[in-house]
Amino acid sequence: MSLFTTLDHLKADLDALRPLAPEQEQRVLQKFRLEWNYNSNAIEGNSLTLGETRSLLLHGLTAAGKPMRDHLDIKGHNEAVLWLEDFVRDDRPLTEQFIRGMHEVLLGEAYYAPAQTATGQSTRKMIVPGQYKQQPNNVLTATGEMFYFASPEETPARMMDLVDWYRQEEAAPTMHPVALAAEFHYRFVRIHPFDDGNGRMSRLLMNLILMRHGYPMTVIQATDRNRYLAALAAADAGDPEPFLRFIIENVEAGLRLMIRAAKGESIDEPDDLDKKLALLKKQVLMREDVVTMTWNTETQTIIWDKLIEFWLTDLMSELVRFDELFLRTEILFSYPDLTPKRITHNDTPTEKRFISNANRKFDGAITIAKEAMSTEPKQLLTECRFSVYWLEFRILEKMFNFHISLELEFDRHGFDAFYNIVQTGVRNPNSANRKNLLNSLYKPEYDLAYIKALNHQLATKVYDFIAAKVAEADSPPS
């Protein structure tokens, strides 16, 4: 039985169902374009996923962290596919000019790409879209041998011969259309006429030939890359049949998909849902704003260990430097349903462990906070506040008291941090300025360098407040 018997039967079935309803045709063409754009680029190493390709082409959304060149390659390939569709509809003759024009559409602007010198040294070369290669583009195989394509000097004549051969074959056919498309693909790859984009161009031109003969777009899957390359290698070794069979297999898959669309059946592959769900999960779960932890006693302990203990300790190391400017310093940690514990020089007998200097007082506040948040917590906190009070500024004429508070409010998915600087003993103080400092989801780890930067900002605000009071004291009365 001929290699093409099944293809011919399927092609006849599809022709009998034509023309497709406009909605069916657009739905299947969109699927073909998306799959073709993703797979043809993925075969060449493009890092965008199918979901990211879909988001880029349908919604214009770029993928965070992915190279801009990869986005440009996807967009350029999509433009080339649309250009190819127009070319087929217009039934124009295939020329070298068209091939070079399509290459220009595919690659867009000129750019640099990694390369190797004749001696194997790493370098880079300028890729000029639409221009035949100016330097050899031979490749080193996995076995360490050099595989040679046409030289830059040979390329123009070899491309002219390829186009002439194709046009003669179209005028007086001796080959099945699918064999013609496969053979053109292989001959083009053997020339490798451009400095970049030859693989994508070979698949574009193969599809041009197939579509001119009434076949649907044929997509070579990225998951079949190794089989694809092995079939090309077999053709290089003088056995073209594995490559022809591989192309036939993919053309058959395209025909079956188009027939299902023409009959109004589902065009999703059996594993499409699993693929789409896996991509959706990846898209959702890799976002920076994904919720991974909710507020409970276990999270409360983790947040203390990973964030708050460091935050308070580092903040105190910033603020203790202002103590010399005041006669007394008091430190307070409080939360709902707990009588605020203020640690002063005049501790009650039950709080003697907090006497002595500010550091000892701070240690006491940390002990209270740790007991509240991480040592078998008896309740789930909704908020807490850490405050440092500076009392009796040392300039007698302008003595004042004030404090700074760091306030944390916890909800189910994350917390808000606020700061507040207040001068005490002043009616309706203008210095009260409770402002948002940080909004964050609960995380297993935090950027502690960022927390240190926030603490330094708070210390700077304390300095600015005190400096303003000193300037006020030094100003002559009006």
Image (cartoon, rainbow, N blue to C red):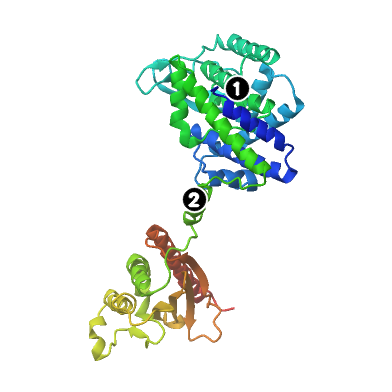
Q: Could you say which is closer to the camera, residue 76 or residue 34?
A: 34
Is disc 2 in contact with disc 1, using a CB cutoff of under 8 Å?
no
> Who's the residue at 51% across and 40% down the image?
67
Q: Residue furthest right?
A: 90
Locate residue 458: give its quadrant: bottom left
- Quadrant in the picture for the C terminus: bottom right
Where 275 sits versus 221, above or below? below
Determine if residue 438 is in view.
Answer: yes
Rendering coords of residue 182 (x, y %): 56, 22
Rendering coords of residue 407 (x, y %): 45, 75
Locate residue 462: give its quadrant: bottom left
Number of labels in the image equals 2
Q: Residue furthest bottom?
A: 349
* Kind of residue indicated by mark 1: Ala
Rendering coords of residue 473 (x, y %): 49, 76
Residue under numbered circle 1? 181
Q: Residues within 10 Å of mark 2 (few under 14, many from 20)?
A: few
* Kind of residue indicated by mark 2: Asp
Q: Residues within 10 Å of mark 1 (few under 14, many from 20)?
A: many
Residue under numbered circle 2? 274
Q: Could you say which is closer to the camera, residue 246 or residue 209?
A: 246
Determine if residue 108 is in view.
Answer: no
Instruction: Give left or right: position of 132 versus 341.
Output: right
Instruction: Give left or right: position of 116 versus 347.
Output: right
